[in-house]
Image (cartoon, rainbow, N blue to C red):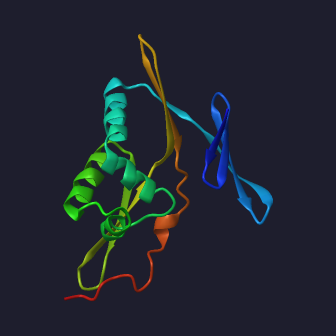
Amino acid sequence: MVYDIGSRTALQCKAVLVVISYFNQNTIMQTLIQTRNVEDEKQKQAILEMLADTYCKQILQATMDRPKSVVDITAETRIPVSTVYRRIQILHDNKIVSISGTISDCGKKYFLYKSKIRAVSVTCDCFSTKIEIVPNIIENEFSSFPKNDFKSCY
């Protein structure tokens, strides 16, 4: 099965997803990812509820490629700040979003949020629901925070 994701094409086999990117007319294989099955029924229900929530999906999409602050997420998605905080908490409680942060010299906390999932596949029949998650590979992106990105201490 072939999926077209913007400028990317994804080829999915039974348990492996290969993502291919097109850059300057050269095909570059970016990554080979193992899918993970969700077995816990409570976790399945939580994932289905998050996928049904428009705000959760927008937050996951906004934080998929790089970690972002709530201010960045709000600016990109136009979701109210309080709603972003509530949805981030739900996503974090269900281990769908990772949180990393630091404290500036003047004591201001600065947190970044990143989606832990790249894609979700749901198969449902009359007897069971099968959910496969494609993890979002996190490459040491939290090790260096953006320089001069802190608002002045006041």
Residue 34: x percent and y percent? 61, 38
Q: Which residue is nearer to you in this view: 74 or 29?
A: 74
Q: Residue at x 31, y 35 (%)?
A: 49
Image position of 133 (left or right of 16): left
Residue 75: x percent and y percent? 34, 69
Q: Residue furthest right?
A: 26
The quadrant of the image that shows the N terminus is top right
Q: Residue at x 24, y 85 (%)?
A: 106
- Determine the image quadrant of residue 24: bottom right
Image position of 140 (left or right of 32): left
Image height check: is 130 above or below 55?
above
Q: Residue furthest top?
A: 127
Image position of 31 (left or right of 37): right
Image height check: is 99 above or below 12?
below
Tally of numbered tags: 0
Q: Residue at x 60, y 53 (%)?
A: 6
Image position of 2 (left or right of 82): right
Image height check: is 92 above or below 123?
below
The quadrant of the image that shows the C terminus is bottom left
Q: Which residue is nearer to you in this view: 82 or 151?
A: 82
